[in-house]
Structures are given as structure tokens and as C-alpha cells.
Amino acid sequence: MAKQHWKPGNMLYPLPAVMVSCQRGEERPNIITIAWAGTICTNPAMLSISVRPERYSYDIIKESGEFVVNLVSKDLIFAADYCGVKSGRNVDKFHAMNLLPQRSQHIHAPGIAQSPVNIECKVSQIIPLGSHHMFLANVVGVSVDDSYMDAGQSFHLNHAGLAAYSHGEYLPLGKPLGKFGYSVKKRKK
């Protein structure tokens, strides 16, 4: 199999497409779309987001020390793209995209009501890395949309129509290919 060899670059795809909401004091809340986000620890629950220092939301998150990661469903893709290309310096993104701020339980910054999952975070560390700075954050609360809960109170996140970002495009997550551990599961004879 022939392959081309390129200079070092970020080709780790797909990535979650998330909308990060933040608010400084009594200013209007803002939203930044981020694809460089990830889980970093289970206990304590932690995640990371990477943001360019020149972005409007960078100072808001740095000064407030908190933010909400809002998962993006296919219904939110247009708003996610808009919030990634427009600056909160110039536009109220909640208003422009008809998004409803959702009161958070543990922090001041609001979540996005239309998102299937809102993850409330408090910044624990900021690591300057070059073009981006990584915000390491403790997860202090999670809100989930009741419509994805079944009668037994099991959460069905994969029914939310989540989207991913890959090489400049937003893509829907599709049909499951297997479940964790299926490769070693004993098969019935």
C-alpha cells in the first residue's frame, strides 16, 4: 500500500464538535465552537479544551475560571458553525442563533438548553502550548436531556444524533460497529 509522507500536523480525526458557553460577571454570555476537546481523567472527572489566546472567549474563560461544554447534535450544527466563525465581540450568539441559556447548577456560566448534554466545568490549570492554550478543568456537574432517558432511567446518548468534526466537515455519528469489549466476549456455541 503506497502512502505519502507529510510534515507534522494535526490529523487526529474525527473529533467531538462542542459548543463551549462562558460568561464573565454580568456581561452577556458567549459561545465558542471547539473541536479540540477531550476527556482526560475519570476520577476526578476532568476534561480539556484548547483555545487560541486571541479568541474572545479565551479571556472570559481565563478570568471566570469556568465554562460549560455543550454536546452538539445534528440539529445544532448550523449554530455550532456560526458560533465558530463569528466573534462574540461583535454579536450575541445566543440571540443570533435562537439558543436558550440554561441556568447551570454549580457555576455562573449558562449552558445551552437545546444541547442534549451540558457539562459544567471549573478550570484547574491553563497550559500554554503554542498556538493554543489548554484549559484543564474539573467537571462539577452534568445535565442531560430527559428525552434520552428510558423508563428504567438509562441514558441513551447515542440516540441524540451527535455530530463530529473531521478535516473541515461536520459529520453525523452513525450506526454502531460494536460495543466496548465485544472483541473478547465469549460467543455462544
Image (spheres, rainbow, N blue to C red):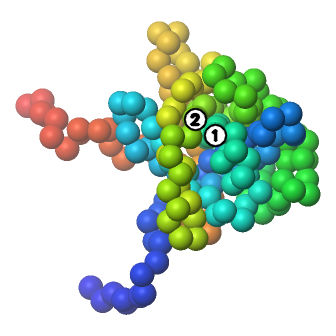
Q: Which residue is tagged 2?
A: 122
Q: Which residue is tagged 1?
A: 65
At x 47% / y 10%, what residue is drawn? 152
Q: Which quadrant of the structure image shows residue 145? A: top right
Residue 181, above or below 17: above
In the rendered image, residue 73, in percent from the top left (x then y), is placed at: 65, 42
Residue 5, above or below 182: below
Residue 136 visible in this rendered orientation of the protein? yes
Q: Residues within 10 Å of mark 2 (few under 14, many from 20)?
A: many
Task: Name the amino acid, label 1.
Answer: Gly
Residue 139, above or below 184: above
**Element marked by disc 1:** loop
Considering every residue shown, the one lying at the far front of the view is 63
At x 60% / y 52%, what residue is drawn? 17
Q: Quadrant of the N terminus?
A: bottom left
Of residues 81 and 149, the one drawn nearer to the viewer in this rendering: 81
